[in-house]
Image (tube, rainbow, N blue to C red):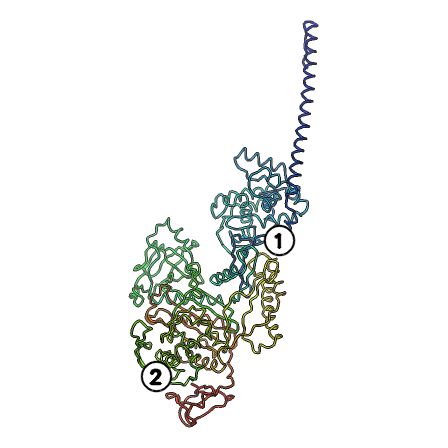
């Protein structure tokens, strides 16, 4: 205790007076401070009240938040509901709260708002903590805004740093907390938040960065995704793996301190290497050319809103047929390429430090890059893009390896791998089972294939080139090429409709045309340069005799022929008005050719190819439904039409429910799939529009039987390997040859295949429709028709069989040697009446044709 000693009473009085003065001043100061505090608080409350009264009426209703529609991209599906592609600026796969794994919830709360389930919208301590972090470290790692505040900002407010915006954010957060549950708030947050690389929401982020669904993510991957909202570009694992891992590990540490994970889980997660890579859109089916066609059609119908409104476009594609088409076309082009020799390595003498960059070259058609690291006499050692060291053995592409010289010439086979390869070379390989690889190269030639349903023109498979990533030019719809002899069946059908028969004789002899419509004298020839004299039309077609087709067209006349060609859906206004038309000189797309052949396959009806079947909105309403003209027998029964449509819908619904049960659908958005199911169940049954008959039943039967002979004994004989009696078709090859075609069908499917170069280069000797295009068609049809029953076309009324002389085409007596041929009843009277007429219901003779 301190004691004061005063020398005089005066000093004592002075001291107490000083104390009294100090006390009075202190009371005045406290009074003034209290007044200031009251005034300040009042002023603050007044300002806050004014702001509230001013801003509150302008705040959006939380009801809007409940009804908010997230921007969901356009998704394209096959007929059996496999995901093909999605289009839209924002990649989003909405998920419900129940679909979010608990570790992901814990990770987001640890990173953004660990008291989320306790606070009422804002946390003063969180705002203060953020301020302290900013002052002490120069950055904010834990964030100052709660998740509720972020929801308010992301859905309703701008990102401009203004006081009024922050005040709005706080007010709106209180309102959100009052009217929405915590689960609803967190679900909105996880679906709306931007995650970088055009991914919005956790569902899209899981797919874009790891190619997984939420339930497939590891703890480390979950923490990486949870670190993205803070700064999607700064902590992006694709842009900066090291920085992303630092953020990830910090979040894992927070989860450990909060008791969300134990020490073992923490150690395992921080020791896990990050394997993020860009996975793009979800896709279960390689059909990029078709997807682009559908995208254009949907945008044409609904405008740019289709990119954000969550539309689902269901196509006519059959996923099984589409897969077979891609495999067959790529294999056929690679086979053609191999026949013409190896063009050499893609790059040579690469330094070892350049290998990683070289190995990031894109994979096209299954041909992936590899680096030659060691060359021995009989094999190579390769470094693959996934870091494996694999051998390429002599028997796997080196034996009999010849290098390309010209389209018609190759070198002698190499005798050693050392003749052609060196360490540091970049080559292409194909992977096989048991780590086996074979030598490959990126082809220069291209191909196209399209398959239609003959009954309504629905496109079941479409491949517009070797690989869409290599070339986006869709050769099915955009490449107009001369079809060559592939066009002849249209000429022959027109002849059959105009009095000619399969036994009509046309002279196969040389001729020279001096036609003013042609640039020079024209001396058409058959393949091989030989001529065979008078030839029956049936034989001329299956042997593809050019001179017969030309003379046939001349006898019919150009005008009558053009009129007949319109039955196949062709625009004849641009066709040449000269005899070259008989040899397919007018360029057409593969889709146009396939549409024409559908008339043969369905018995004489014109159908229009189409690919977009229906469009469903996010609420499950069908907003577009195709109504194709369809071949049906009979078509006068609305009940039958409804039953047929209902069966199609039921098959789609059955496929969807099966996939849901097996959890085989790629998308995690269960609500979307349920909406599609509901839409299919509620689809209005559209009455079938009957297709128009454009070829009489008898002519259709005759041309079908003639085209079957192309496969039985003509230029398409290789297709007999399929061991089906219901196949028909025609090869086509143009001068050079530059284009190779095969178009063929069964009653189940009509398919056109084209092979050639985009720059119209020569294909090379011996590359014809039967050698380049037909093998692709065979490979595809083998898979597409697997399990399909053979269908025999019934012989229609008005068709009879007559025994004729194979050389003259004239009718012969029963005891004479001859063959049986189909005729229209009306044409039989024109034959000499001295032969055999087979009744319509008699069995087919063994020596028919």
Q: Name the image quarter holding residue 560.
A: bottom left
* Mark 2 surroundings within 10 Å by alpha-carbon count, few (fewer than 14), some (14 through 19), many (20 or more): some
Image spot of residue 531 (x, y percent):
32, 81
Quick check: 199 above or below 756? above
In the image, taking residue 16 as reference, residue 356 lies left or right, namely left
Give the residue pinned by disc 1: 96
| Image-based side of 239 in relation to 401, left or right | right
Residue 781 visible (yes or no) = no
- Count of numbered labels shown in the rendering: 2
Mark 2 or 1, which is nearer the eye? 2
The residue positioned 69% from the left and 13% from the top of the image is 19
Does residue 420 appear to the left or right of 460 in the view shown? left
Quarter-of-image position of residue 668: bottom right
Tag 2 residue:
507
Q: Is residue 246 above or below residue 16?
A: below
Q: In x, y percent, where is residue 624? A: 57, 63
Q: Tell me which numbered mark, 2 or 1, is placed earlier along the sequence.
A: 1
């Amino acid at each position: 205790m301190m004691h004061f000693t005063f020398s005089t009473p005066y000093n004592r009085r002075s001291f107490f007076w000083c104390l009294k003065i100090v006390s009075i001043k202190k009371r005045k100061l406290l009074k003034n401070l209290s007044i200031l505090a009251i005034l300040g608080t009042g002023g603050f409350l007044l300002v806050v009240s004014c702001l509230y009264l001013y801003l509150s009426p302008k705040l959006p209703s939380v009801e809007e938040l409940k009804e908010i529609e997230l921007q969901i991209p356009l998704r394209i599906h096959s007929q059996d509901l496999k995901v093909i592609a999605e289009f839209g600026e924002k990649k989003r796969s909405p998920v419900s709260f129940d679909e979010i794994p608990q570790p992901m919830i814990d990770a987001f709360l640890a990173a953004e708002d660990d008291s989320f389930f306790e606070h009422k919208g804002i946390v003063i301590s969180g705002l203060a903590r953020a301020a302290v972090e900013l002052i002490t470290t120069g950055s904010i790692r834990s964030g100052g805004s709660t998740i509720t505040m972020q929801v308010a900002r992301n859905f309703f407010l701008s990102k401009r740093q203004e006081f009024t915006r922050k005040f709005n954010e706080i007010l709106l957060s209180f309102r959100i907390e009052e009217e929405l549950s915590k689960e609803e708030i967190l679900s909105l947050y996880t679906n709306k938040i931007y995650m970088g690389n055009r991914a919005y929401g956790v569902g899209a982020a899981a797919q874009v960065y790891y190619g997984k669904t939420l339930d497939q993510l590891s703890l480390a991957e979950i923490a990486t995704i949870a670190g993205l909202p803070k700064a999607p570009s700064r902590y992006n694992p694709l842009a900066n793996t090291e920085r992303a891992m630092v953020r990830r590990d910090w979040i894992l540490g927070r989860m450990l301190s909060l008791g969300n994970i134990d020490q073992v889980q923490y150690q395992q997660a921080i020791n896990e290497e990050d394997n993020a890579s860009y996975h793009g859109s979800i896709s279960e089916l390689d059909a990029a050319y078709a997807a682009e066609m559908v995208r254009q059609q949907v945008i044409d119908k609904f405008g740019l809103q289709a990119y954000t409104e969550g539309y689902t476009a269901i196509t006519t594609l059959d996923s099984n047929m589409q897969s077979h088409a891609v495999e067959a076309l790529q294999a056929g082009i690679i086979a053609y390429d191999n026949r013409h020799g190896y063009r050499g390595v893609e790059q040579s003498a690469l330094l070892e430090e350049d290998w990683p960059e070289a190995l990031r070259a894109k994979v096209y058609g299954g041909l992936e890059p590899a680096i030659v690291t060691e060359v021995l006499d009989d094999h190579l050692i390769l470094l693959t893009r996934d870091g494996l060291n694999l051998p390429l053995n002599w028997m796997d592409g080196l034996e009999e390896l010849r290098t390309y010289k010209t389209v018609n010439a190759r070198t002698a086979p190499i005798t050693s791998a050392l003749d052609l390869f060196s360490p540091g070379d970049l080559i292409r390989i194909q992977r096989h089972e048991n780590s086996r690889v074979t030598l490959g190269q990126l082809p220069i030639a291209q191909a196209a294939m399209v398959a239609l349903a003959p009954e309504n023109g629905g496109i079941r498979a479409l491949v517009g080139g070797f690989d869409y990533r290599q070339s986006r030019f869709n050769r099915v719809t955009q490449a107009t090429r001369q079809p060559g002899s592939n066009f002849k069946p249209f000429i022959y059908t027109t002849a059959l409709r105009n009095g000619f028969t399969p036994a009509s004789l046309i002279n196969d002899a040389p001729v020279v045309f001096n036609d003013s419509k042609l640039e020079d004298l024209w001396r058409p020839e058959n393949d091989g340069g030989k001529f065979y004299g008078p030839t029956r039309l049936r034989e001329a077609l299956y042997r593809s005799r050019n001179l017969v087709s030309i003379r046939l067209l001349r006898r019919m006349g150009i005008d009558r022929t053009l009129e007949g060609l319109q039955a196949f859906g062709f625009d004849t206004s641009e066709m040449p008005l000269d005899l070259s038309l008989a040899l397919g000189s007018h360029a057409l797309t593969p889709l146009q050719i396939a549409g024409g052949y559908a008339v043969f396959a369905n018995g004489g009806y014109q159908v229009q190819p189409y690919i977009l079947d229906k469009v469903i909105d996010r609420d499950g309403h069908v907003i577009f439904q195709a109504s194709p003209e369809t071949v049906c027998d009979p078509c006068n029964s609305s009940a039958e039409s409804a039953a047929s449509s209902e069966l199609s819908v039921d098959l789609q619904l059955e496929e969807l429910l099966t996939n849901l049960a097996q959890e085989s659908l790629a998308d995690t958005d269960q609500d979307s799939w349920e909406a599609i199911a509901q839409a299919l169940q509620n689809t209005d049954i559209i009455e079938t529009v009957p297709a128009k008959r454009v070829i009489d039943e008898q002519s259709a039967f005759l041309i079908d039987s003639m085209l079957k002979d192309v496969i039985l004994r003509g230029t398409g004989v290789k297709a007999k390997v399929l061991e089906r009696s219901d196949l028909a078709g025609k090869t086509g090859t143009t001068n050079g040859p530059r284009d190779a075609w095969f178009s063929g069908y069964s009653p189940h499917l009509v398919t056109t295949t084209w092979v050639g170069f985009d720059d119209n280069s020569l294909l090379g000797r011996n590359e014809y429709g039967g050698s380049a295009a037909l093998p692709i068609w065979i490979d595809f049809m083998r898979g597409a028709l697997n399990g399909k029953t053979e269908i025999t076309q019934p012989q229609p009324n008005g068709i009879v069989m007559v025994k004729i002389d194979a050389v003259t085409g004239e009718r012969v007596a029963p005891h004479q040697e001859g063959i049986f041929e189909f005729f229209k009843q009306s044409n039989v009277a024109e034959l000499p009446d001295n032969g055999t007429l087979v009744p319509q219901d008699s069995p087919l003779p063994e020596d028919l044709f």
